[in-house]
Image (tube, helix red, strand yellow):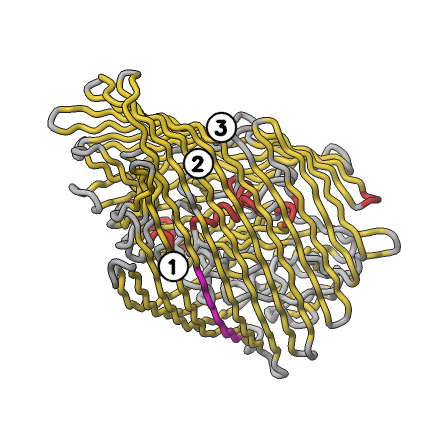
Amino acid sequence: MKTLKKSLLSTILLYLFISFTFETLAQNNISGRVKSETNEPLPGSTVLLMEKADSSLIKASFTNADGYFLFDKVKKGDYLLNISYVGYENQVVPATIGNTPTEYSLKVAGLVLGQVVVVGKKPLIEQKIDRLVINVKNSITSAGGTVLDILQKSPGIVVNKQAGTLSMSGKDGVRVMINGKMSYIPAAALLNMLQGMSSNNVERIELITTPPAKYDAGGNAGYINIVLSQKLDEGLNGSYALTAAGFNGSAPVANADLNYRKNKLNLYGGYSFSRLAQMQYVSNDRTTVFESVSTQTKINSVRDPYQLNNGLRAGMDYQLGKKTALGILVSTYRNEWSMKANNTSVISQNGIEINRINIANNETNLWKHGMVNANIQHEFAKGGELAFNIDLLKYDNANPNTYQNIFSQQGIFEREDNLTSSKKTVINMLPIALDFNKKLNNKLSIESGVKTVISRFSNDVLVQNQVEGAWVSDEEFTADYSLKENIAAAYGSANYTLNTKNSFKGGLRYEYTISNLGSDKQANIVDRKYGYIFPTVYWSHKINDDHSFNINYNKRINRPAFNDLAPFLIFVDPNTFISGNAALQPAIANNLSAGFNIKMVNVSLNYSHEDYSIGGFQLKINTETNKQYNTAENLKFTESLFATVSVPTKIAKWWNGQLNFNASANHAVADFIQPEVSVKVMNYSLSGFQGFSVSPKISMELSGFYQSKGLYGISVMKAFGQLNYGAVYKFPKADANLKFGVDDIFSTMKFNFEQNSEILGYEAKMNLNMQRRIFKLTYSKNFGNKQVKAKRNRTTASDAERQRVK
């Protein structure tokens, strides 16, 4: 791995040397800053440089994060600039040659021109200065699916449904935001929530690998921001979508959104429903060796699950004055996962069967959530904005299990054991945040803020065995846990644009945590107090119109999920368990990355070193008793070198797409088992889409991904992938469309894990077939007024906390 570090640094230094060697001082520059009428920068605006005589195109560029653009080494002459941004009126103006940037203000567009509606279409994938943006509304294959389906197809994202985890750029610890508001959902419920969110409700998804100091320091991999659709139109309007899906299972989806905007008042809301039912097949094999006796355990599970999701959100924004706005947001969901399973566990020694257990298992995992947010923003007369947020969140989880275990030997009935386990979890959070930002001049802006999060957690675990017809508690596993945690944070950051070629971002964030976990049997199981400073540094440099690069560094913390700290217990069979781990420590990561833009091609390199990495569901096998424990564990460290190349493709006017290539070198060292284990794996993946425009009303799309084998803690996850197809027919007069899609055409979404250790005397394998091919038909329609009026940008205080609830 030291060689990898040197290679990364050498690559960066070589690129910088070549860049500055060929860069010369511009003699004839055309530069400027694109902003809104309220003086806000418009990053990503398209700027076309054209000949004044015949309006022929010479060059094209995009504005950076601060709204600046530059055309350098321009020949003397007369030129025009065509400046555009989605939702704003185009502006065509004479170009000014010189070294001083000219400011250009764009007006908000009124999109209704007589009876003709002008629609700006964004590309499916956009590379921004600090994030990758996936414009979900433009994806045909995403229609009728879920947010989790979209993430599964996104560049650099790996979804592990069995473990309930997300990873980005080869790193675990992803945080999820909804409309820029941190989701403090428990990790165990996160994938259920994303599986229950209809993609029809989503405008775009932003993959933020280098979060600024404003965001909580939690989560090594960065943030995923899910931006829900919100109508900007005056009056009453909305949309709805209905999806029928079937073949291998069923997956109906329905959602509706309403928006009312009049003068100072804006009311909005939405409801979504989905039900997913697909058979699942799971196998778990392990072989242990103790005192020359080889014991084989083979577990096969046939599962018949369904997941029923209901989500509701409603909000209000009211303009108290010209400079002050008040907002209230209420959201709730109810996600129920229920399963009936038949499991068979066969135990053999030296190839001879000695025991067989048939297990009838019924499980329900019900999550209920409610959130209330109050938000007030004030703009000062001399510039600057102050925002205050307070959230109240509650999560309620019930997870009962019943097990009927029938033991037999060589086909002869031996005995029957009945067992139940249940977990009742309640989580309450109160995040409060105060944020201030101010643009001091055209080059410098600052941000600062403070935040506190008060969390309370209770976890009641009950395990019972049936003895002579009566239920008796198993005191070894039964306990009532409670956790109290307080986090206080303060941050400051600055954005500085040196010139049209160089911009800098920097910030510091300090977080102090007090955490205490105890039970009715033992106090102070965890009693910690710790504080860390988290720096973020970012430099972006534009060499010319076709070449630019950026370098950034940040430090992050990955705190254990509440559910992993407060133990729970799930039985796969009488010798195989899944449980929590109260001894988990927070993980600390240092990340260095560099990005290069060569025309439309984006290349990025990222190196990460994380101490005390948290690996979910790591195997611990006792070879003497043949018992297997699956728990979250701290690894000694993990490190990875991750490279990404994103290439847009345009074969013809009717054929365009995007390809993303990822490669990584991963190294994990674990000392929670002895002797110490070290695992190294090279990994690569390919993702993207190809879109085909058959006619103005008909278009098609192929999308998918392939992921080679990679690390999951110290286990190796084998290769998997998926290919999807979609087609859409548009009804322009009705402002509606009909979409047909096929998910997982070849039924290749299968997860396979293995862990071998000759030194420890065991090998283990797990195979998961969690989903298969399914056909979807979606009808969606917009209705109501189309007169655009700008909305207010707002966040909540709980944007980061919802990630620690699984």
The residue identified by callout 1 is: 458
Does residue 466 lie above or below 115 as drawn?
above
- Where does the image place residue 130, in percent across and percent down from the top left? 50, 57
Q: Secondary structure at mark 2?
A: strand
Q: Earlier in the sequence, mark 2 or mark 3?
A: 2
Does residue 705 lie above or below 598 as drawn?
above
Q: Earlier in the sequence, mark 2 or mark 1?
A: 2
For the point 51% across and 37% down, the residue is 687
Between 193 and 43, the one nearer to me in the picture? 193
Quadrant in which residue 769 is drawn: top left
The reply to whether discs 2 and 3 touch (Cβ–Cβ < 8 Å) is no
Query: Is 319 displayed left or right of 184 in the figure?
Result: right
Confirm whether residue 92 shows in the render: no
Q: Count residues near mark 2 (Cα–Cα under 10 Å), then give few for <14, some for 14-19, many for 20+.
A: some
Q: Count residues near mark 1 (Cα–Cα under 10 Å), then give few for <14, some for 14-19, many for 20+.
A: many
- Where does the image place residue 655, in percent across and percent down from the top left? 66, 35
The residues bearing labels 1 and 3 have C-alpha atoms spaced at a distance of: 40 Å
The chief SS type of the magenta part is strand
The residues bearing labels 2 and 1 have C-alpha atoms spaced at a distance of: 24 Å
The residue identified by callout 2 is: 362
Quadrant in which residue 736 is drawn: top right
Q: Which residues are magenta?
A: 427-436
Number of on-image labels: 3
The reply to whether discs 1 and 3 touch (Cβ–Cβ < 8 Å) is no
Query: What kind of residue is marked 2?
Result: Asn
Confirm whether residue 712 shows in the render: yes
Q: Secondary structure at mark 1?
A: strand
The residue identified by callout 3 is: 748
